[in-house]
Structures are given as C-alpha cells and as structure tokens.
Image (cartoon, grey):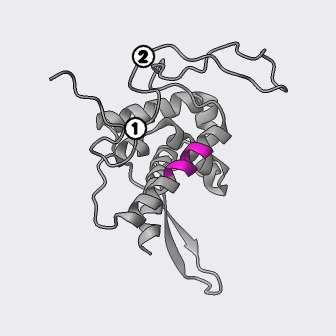
Amino acid sequence: MGTRARSPVPETGYPRRPGKVACEGGAPVVVGARENRVHGEGGQGVGQCPESEQRSVDSDQQALAWLLNVQRKLYQWSKANPNESYRDLWNWVTSPHNLWCAWRRVASNRGARTAGIDGYTVRKIRRDQGEDVFLAKLRHDLRTGRYRPSPCRRRLIPKRGKPGEFRPLGIPTVRDRVVQSAVKQVIEPIFEAGF
C-alpha cells in the first residue's frame, strides 16, 4: 500500500549523504550578524542535485575536512562492527575529495620531483595538463576500470656505511602514487581500529 519511504541508512550500513536524493529548492537561511546577507535572504540549498559528479574541489580545507570525516566514520564503524564487510569503499576511494587529498600528499612530498617510468613529475603534470584535468581523467579511468598500474622505475642506491653495496629502489609513476595514497587514506582507519 503506497510507496515505501527510503531509509536514511541504506544496505551499506552508513547514512546517505544529504542532498543527493531529492531535487527540490532550499529553505531560507538566517545569516549571522557578521556576514554579508541580510537575515532570511538566500537559500540553503538542502536537497539540491549536484551539478556534476566531477565538480572541482573548492579548497584544500574542504577536501581535508571531508577526508577526516570519512576516516572518523570508518574508524568508528569498524570498531563497532569488526566482522562486518565493507561494500562501498570504492566510491570513497574514487571520490574527487579523496583524490584531491592524495594529490596534495604526493605533490608536497620530496619525491614529487622524481619521475616514474613515464617521465612525468608533479611539476610537468601541472604545466602540461593541470591538476583538475589530471585528477578528472584518473578518476574516470578508475571508475570505468581502465586504470592499469605502470611498472616501477628501478634505481640502485648506495647503502649507507657499506661502500660498494647497493639496494634497489622502485619509483612508481605520479599517477600510481596518487592511487596508492587514495587507497591508503580509506583503508588505514579500518585497519587502525583492529590494531
């Protein structure tokens, strides 16, 4: 009889993100005294549809806040349900916010100046195609299953204190480093709760 109401907690076990289900107008907003708009002007935008799933991330702080929130949820959920399975991790791994944070981590690392087997460094990616285009293409490849990791560039580095001896070092491409960092950021809180 009638339609079934959608539960705010789907089969994945965690609440849906607000604003992704219905496409309706927003409610009036009461703005604080220090802000520009007069009280009651504007709309909050609750329940609006996103313009594009691949929109650019507004700022580093917003992406970092999103990532910390997801990590906190994953940690708490895996602490409370240690034997449960995770069904929706791939969406968080391939989220634009997560990829942006992974890119920032890779770009700020000292190894950003080192190229992998493809010859691309962080500086060259920024100069040739830009961060947003690079991340959008990487996300598309991940979501469609076209992403394939590249072989690592191998270098022999001298061992400290042992002249004439070397140790091998594998240098992945920047693209692979971003994917590795994105996966690490999502699965780390799950394993951290168990340890």
Residue 83: percent from left, percent from top: 28, 66
Residue that extends furthest to the left in the rendered view of this protein: 1
Q: Few, some or many C-alpha atoms within 10 Å of disc 1 (few <14, some 14-19, many ≥20)? A: few
Residue 153 appears in the rendering:
no
Image mark for residue 132: none
The vertical placement of 62 against 33, above or below, is below
Q: Quadrant of the C terminus?
A: bottom left
> In the image, which residues are magenta?
64-70
Q: In what element is the residue under mark 2?
A: loop
Q: Amino acid at mark 2?
A: Cys
| Residue 12 in the figure: left or right of residue 43 | left
Which secondary structure, mark 1?
A: loop
Q: Which mark is residue 16?
A: 1
**Residue ID for mark 2:** 23
Q: Is residue 30 visible?
A: yes
Relative depth, front residue between 9 and 49: 9
Q: Picture coordinates of residue 17 (x, y %)?
A: 44, 36
| Magenta span dominant secondary structure | helix
Q: Residue at x 55, y 82 (%)?
A: 165
Place of residue 176 in the rendered image (x, y in percent of width and height, measured from the top left): 45, 49
Q: Residue at x 48, y 17 (%)?
A: 51
**The residue positioned farthest toward the front in the image shown:** 1
Q: What is the tally of numbered marks visible in this picture? A: 2
Relative horizontal placement of residue 190, taking residue 25 as reference (left or right): left
